[in-house]
Image: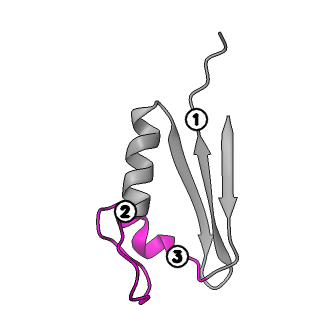
Amino acid sequence: MILEIGDNGLGIDLNKHRSKLFGMYKTFHTHKDSRGIGLFITKNQVEAMGGKIEVESELNKGTTFKIYFKYEKN
């Protein structure tokens, strides 16, 4: 099962930030209410359930996250 979430916001320079993207307390813009914990927690929880996350982003055009959940049919 795949959950795809996208926006048309600021985007993230993945060439510059990909290795830090899911790090704790990492932010990639200057919004003062940002804490940099959301992606860290999300990735850890998804991976704990056997899934994975992929990201595509382009500066000034937006970002799309694909969350792949492990699915076992009973």
What SS does tag 1 mark? loop
Quadrant occupied by the C terminus: top right
Quadrant of the rendered image containing residue 33: bottom left
Q: Is residue 12 magenta?
A: yes
Label 2 and label 1: CA atoms lie apart by 22 Å
What SS does tag 3 mark? loop
Viewer-side residue, 43 vs 20: 43
Mark 2 vs mark 1: in front = 1
Q: Which mark is residue 19?
A: 2
Q: Which mark is residue 69?
A: 1
**Residue type of the residue flagged with mark 3:** Ile
**Residue at 37% from the left image edge and 57% from the top image edge:** 40
Residue 24 at x, y = what percent? 29, 63
Residue 49 at x, y = what percent? 45, 31
Mark found first going from the N terminus, 2 or 3: 3
Q: Is residue 19 left or right of residue 67?
A: left
Mark found first going from the N terminus, 2 or 1: 2
What's the magenta region?
10-37
Viewer-side residue, 34 vs 4: 34
Viewer-side residue, 62 vs 73: 73
**Residue at 60% from the left image edge and 69% from the top image edge:** 57
**Residue at 38% from the left image edge and 76% from the top image edge:** 27
Q: Say few, some or many: other residues with alpha carbon within 10 Å of mark 3 (under 14 / 14 to 19 / 20 or more).
A: many
Residue 72 at x, y = what percent? 61, 17
Label 1 and label 3: CA atoms lie apart by 24 Å
Residue of label 3: 12
Mark found first going from the N terminus, 1 or 3: 3
